[in-house]
Amino acid sequence: MIELHSHKDLSRLKRLALSSQGLLQAKPFGSGLSGARKAIAHLGYVQIDTISVVERAHHHVLHSRVPSFDPSMVNQLVVSGEVFEYWSHAAAFLPIDDFRFSLPYKNAIKSGQVHWYKNPDQKLMGQLLARIRSEGPLRSRDVDAKNNNRKGGWWDWKPAKKALEQLYMQGDLMVCGRESFQKTYDLTERVLPSHIDSAIPSMEEFAKHLIDQQLRCYGLVSIKSVTYLRRNIELRKAVKNLVEGGVAQGTLERIKIANGDVFFMRSGALDRTPRLNNRLSILSPFDNSVIQRDRLKSLFEFDYQIECYVPELKRQYGYFCLPLLFRGEFIGRMDCKAHRKEGCLEIKSLYIEKTKIVDELMMSAFVDAIDTFRIFQQCDSVVLSNISPKPLMQPFQAALKTRY
């Protein structure tokens, strides 16, 4: 086991994690549509989210890594069959080459081992399949069915919409396109490209896939993080056995950091960590680099929570704070809102938690990042309403005024 205690060693470990995420290089995956395709393939998934106070999370994640990315490109990749929608640890866009690794969960739902909806309406599901088979792709809003008696949350969807979702989750249907958040479904056999492997993986194949994927996009992993939010006990055992086997064979190294947490990485990976740059990144709360909160806190000492699910009076930072990354550290967070009709990006609260890094270089990087982010939000102006610590208000406002 390699024990890392010095600040220099931990910094190298952080750089490995961030470069593996594509957050240190200017064009890690290229640009435009090709860059978006390669980014999704490398990351393994991009989480879908509906919150729109700023541009939605799945677009934001790609914007952070792919120059010239446009939100329409994601649907282009779905329609062309290069990306598909399904469940990762949440709803996500995934590379089509990984399709076979969605099959164990689909089969578990279809067999009743795992429930998406309890007591699904098999008769209605059969009718919908027959309709799609004969009439072609179907949008959920096009289904004519009576509402349930109850009204309100997502659990009260129309029976037909539930049936569509059940068919999708168990693998009979796939999403073949989207209009905003309106899915269009078609038969899997008509959507899945013919060259894609659809053989169900063994438990060991699935475990190896997850380990390879996580090492590729995170650089270093823990046993727990490889199976993040996957509750299959046999899968966890298979992952543990493969990781321990990799250590025994010398293909993996076990790393212990100062707080006692243990990670694993490819042998020699620390020898290839890139240099830091002076770019500041504004990340989504659902960004792949921050979604595993325990890992984020352990490695970067950044304690982060999305507070949109927290009652307003109990929020510490704001509804939808965005993590700020600069020179290998998470230096703070920013709660903001895009007022698109007015063309204004409002920074409701800016929290700089590592104040020692604040200098002209950092503030210039912040203004550059805000300018790029403003354009991404389709806004023309920027307003800074609040900052902590408060003495930073004047210099940050002055820096922003050089652009606006």
Image: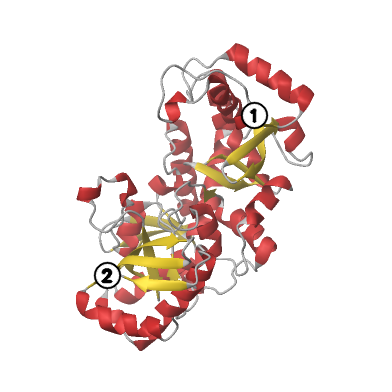
Q: Amino acid at mark 1?
A: Asp
Check the image and report above or below for 258 versus 229: below
Q: Is residue 258 left or right of residue 76?
A: left
Q: Position of residue 140 (x, y in %)?
A: 61, 30
Q: Is residue 259 left or right of residue 61?
A: left
- Determine crowd level at label 2: few under 14, some 14-19, many 20+ residues with C-alpha closer than 10 A: some
Q: CA distance from mark 2 to mark 1?
A: 45 Å
Identify the residue shown where x is 51% and y is 56%: 215
Q: Amino acid at mark 2?
A: Asn
Identify the residue shown where x is 74% and y is 48%: 80
Q: Is residue 213 left or right of residue 13?
A: right
Q: Which of the labelled discs sits on residue 178, or is there none?
A: none
Q: Is residue 269 left or right of residue 123?
A: left
Check the image and report above or below for 397 versus 19: below
Q: State whether residue 249 appears in this view.
A: no
Identify the residue shown where x is 45% and y is 47%: 226
Q: Nearer the viewer, residue 48 or 339?
A: 339
Q: State whether residue 8 appears in this view.
A: yes
Q: Which of the labelled discs sits on residue 386, or is there none?
A: 2
Image quarter hosting the N terminus: bottom left
Identify the residue shown where x is 67% and y is 16%: 127
**According to the image, label 1 marks what residue?**
142
- Determine crowd level at label 1: few under 14, some 14-19, many 20+ residues with C-alpha closer than 10 A: few
Q: Position of residue 214 (x, y in %)?
A: 50, 52
Q: Give SS at disc 2.
A: loop
